[in-house]
Image (cartoon, rainbow, N blue to C red):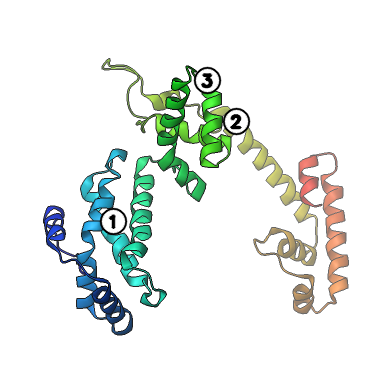
Amino acid sequence: MALDGYADQAMSRKAMKAELLDAETELALAYAWRDHRDEQALHRLITAYMRLAISMASKFRRYGAPMNDLIQEASLGLMKAADKFDPDRGVRFSTYAVWWIKASIQDHVMRNWSMVRTGSTSSQKSLFFNMRRVQARIEREAEKEGRTLPGHELRRLIAEEVGVPLHDVEMMQGRLAGSDYSLNATQSAEDEGREWIDTLEDDSDQAAERVENNHDTDTLRQWLLGALNALNERERFIVRERKLREDPRTLESLGNELGLSKERVRQLEAAAFGKMRKSLEGQSGEVLSLLA
């Protein structure tokens, strides 16, 4: 592609020296790329508008992303715009490209803001990039009136201003309040300070529970095997194929294999379950539920 191989600083210097396209030249280049896949025309079109991409990237530096990364994302957005631009619509390429450049940069900022996904809907994106500005303006207006807004009232006004639910504002405020921390970081500066991960509750089965569960499982298995052994060979075959396979077979397929009607297989299955129930009576309600 047109931007491959450029170092970021060299790209910025080159962009500032690029030609300024008039509307007629821009249109001709767009047609050459769309209709003939002329890569020279694409290169010229993208290079001419790299200054726009760099200018937009610089507006997002306050979110903490490296400028080099922002420029690369802006470049990707510019190339997507060039690839999808339809010159027949009668708009300037720069007007169309602004949306793609901005979307690419915003997606990058939100992906890298936190390991926890910050937001994916259009309302959450709008809140992420506008909440601090809106909050500052609301606080300034309240200060001019001599008022101090409590937290819940401030969040309500932000939600109304941006047009999002209140719980979205509360969630985003928490996300923007701080950065990610490692669970392996120590709680204090001491050499043997406990790591934060040590404070998390272990919700897995404890040793005693595992032993008890394994014992119960073994007991249930022995009861079921005993009940199966009380059946004749054909009945055991039907029960295995109907209840013990990951992909249970149909009555019709078993009937075809055994040379029986579907109704006869159903009757044999019901009779086998009846025998197993009788064998298991009084031992465990859990086992009986498996045969329901």
User: Where residue 272 sits in the image (x, y, percent)?
Assistant: 84, 59
Q: Which callout, 3 or 2, points at the residue further toward the start of the chain?
A: 3
Q: Quadrant of residue 209?
A: top right
Query: In this orientation, does residue 121 appear?
Result: no
Residue in the image at 38% along x and 47% along y? 111
- Compare residues 192 and 100 and report the one nearer the observer: 100
Q: Which callout, 2 or 1, points at the residue further toward the start of the chain?
A: 1
| Residue 83 to residue 146: above or below | below
Q: Which residue is mark 1?
A: 74
**Amino acid at pointer 2:** Glu
- Compare residues 205 and 186 and report the one nearer the observer: 186
Mark 2 Cα shell of 10 Å, populated few (<14), some (14-19), many (≥20): few
Q: CA distance from mark 3 to mark 2?
A: 49 Å
Q: Which residue is mark 3?
A: 150
Residue in the image at 79% along x and 70% along y? 251
**Amino acid at pointer 1:** Ala
Q: Quadrant of residue 110?
A: top left
